[in-house]
Amino acid sequence: MESFNGAPPALDKSQISGAPEQWDRSGLPAWAYTNHEQLELERDVLFRRHWQLAGHVSNAPEPGNYFCFDVAGERAIIVRGKDNEIRAFHNVCRHRGSRVVVNETGTCGSAMVCPFHGWSFNLDGTLRTVAQPKAVPTLDPVEHGLVPVEFEIWHGFVFVRFQPGPQPAVADILARHEAEIALYRSAEAVPTRNSFWSQEIGANWKCVRDVDNEGYHVPMAHPGLQDLYGNNYFDEHWQGGTTRSFGPFKDETNRLWSVRAYNSVLPEVDYLPESHRRAWLYIGMFPNQVLYFYPDGLGFYQEFPIATDKTVLRGGAYGMPLSEAGDATFNRHIRAARYLSERIDNDTAVEDIQLTVWSNEAAHSSGFQGFILSDLEYGVKQYHDQLRAIMPVLRQSEPPEQGCLEINNNKLLASLAPE
Ligand code: FES
Ligand SMILES: [Fe+2]
């Protein structure tokens, strides 16, 4: 059985850099993790008004293929048209608002047929037919088509935004990572699982992000990752709504069989430079998603609030298509590497979920007196700063009076706005 006992290895001092001498190490107030009005505000100003990673173009590879994406009461359908173009619409029937497609992924042939009364929509969203047309007034197919959702495709990843928000285009947000991510050819990737994975956990969504925004816990909590890259791992600070973490593999014999096997089976991926052939790369994007890039595959993970103490984790995994006509040994090794990296990730996810649940419990405890963040958790503070800028009510140590949170927040925003 794999286990990790004893004290975490000493940290490389060169990694503790960038944080100022003096900074507020206390984190968000505990009430921010338990307050229902705060969650409603977050659902609106963060999840509806910021770019959300819905999936990848390869989740809808053929005309008529679609995938769905639900968040904060909104629901989108991303569908590939007859012209091979990807489009995004609200998954809301124009008749009475039913879901037009029900499954998370699927194919709808040449039209999307609403399961409630049978109105149908073309793949470009226009209204195609209504059931029993003599009973329905004549409707303009464009005007009464599915309502479009703003979307953007970046290196194969499909982002949607349900309401206008403060962020620039996805390509602008991620521009500083463009050259590095282009190495991985993610636009050509295909799913390596049947569809998306998701899991509900019992914690506030910000606890998930707090855990994910620092690598300080890796030596103690993640034996697999510590064995894989250990102190080589480094979190860069948040900048322009993104963060980058890079973990070049350790140059020593691994202790855990899964990591040892992964390291030994991982082939040379010749389209990557030497620096990225034996390393894992993570790009975080505000407010709730991370893109990851491994030599053997790539993907994303994210979290969505369901309630103050209930969160859905979701993600997708992709890899370069393996040609049957290609090198059989390479293909076999890549498949084994994908199995093993997924196994290491699954162990890491179980460990992170436990830390997240414990963090959530802390926010409910009368003994919790705020964080004392280390310099290696400066990313947590930087992330909280981004939340405080959008929701200045989070600067208050005590929650606003019941029913007043949004009003208080709007007043604070108005007082902080430039003249
Ligand atoms: S709600 Fe879709 S056809 Fe009636
Ligand atoms: Fe972690």
Image (cartoon, rainbow, N blue to C red):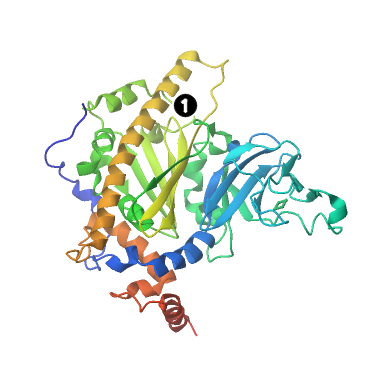
Circle 1 residues within 10 Å: few <14, some 14–19, many ≥20: few
| Residue 389 horizontal/vertical position (percent) | 41, 70
Residue 13 position within the rendered picture, expressed as x and y whole percent measured from the top left? 19, 49
Foreground pick, 277 / 54: 54
Q: Quadrant of residue 164?
A: bottom right
Q: Is 294 left, or right, of 173 in this rendering?
A: left
* Residue 216 located left or right of residue 94: left
Which residue sits furthest left? Answer: 6
The answer to whether residue 37 is above or below residue 304 is below
Q: Residue at x 33, y 63 (%)?
A: 33
Quadrant of the rendered structure where residue 269 is?
Answer: top left
> Between residues 289 and 358, which one lies in front from this camera angle?
358
Q: Amino acid at mark 1?
A: Asp
Residue 96 in sight from this viewpoint: yes
From the viewer's perspective, is 135 left or right of 216? Answer: right
Residue 171's place in the image compared with 66, above or below, is below
Report the side of 197 relative to 232 (left or right): right
Decide which of 115, 194 is in the foreground and name it: 115
Number of on-image labels? 1
How far across and down, in percent of the image, does residue 16 sit? 23, 53
Q: Compared with residue 70, is residue 62 higher up or lower down, i.e. above or below? A: above
Q: Quadrant of the N terminus?
A: top left
From this view, report whether residue 351 is shown above or below residue 297.
below
User: Residue reaching furthest bottom?
Assistant: 419
Identify the residue under disc 1. 270
Which structural element holds mark 1? Answer: loop
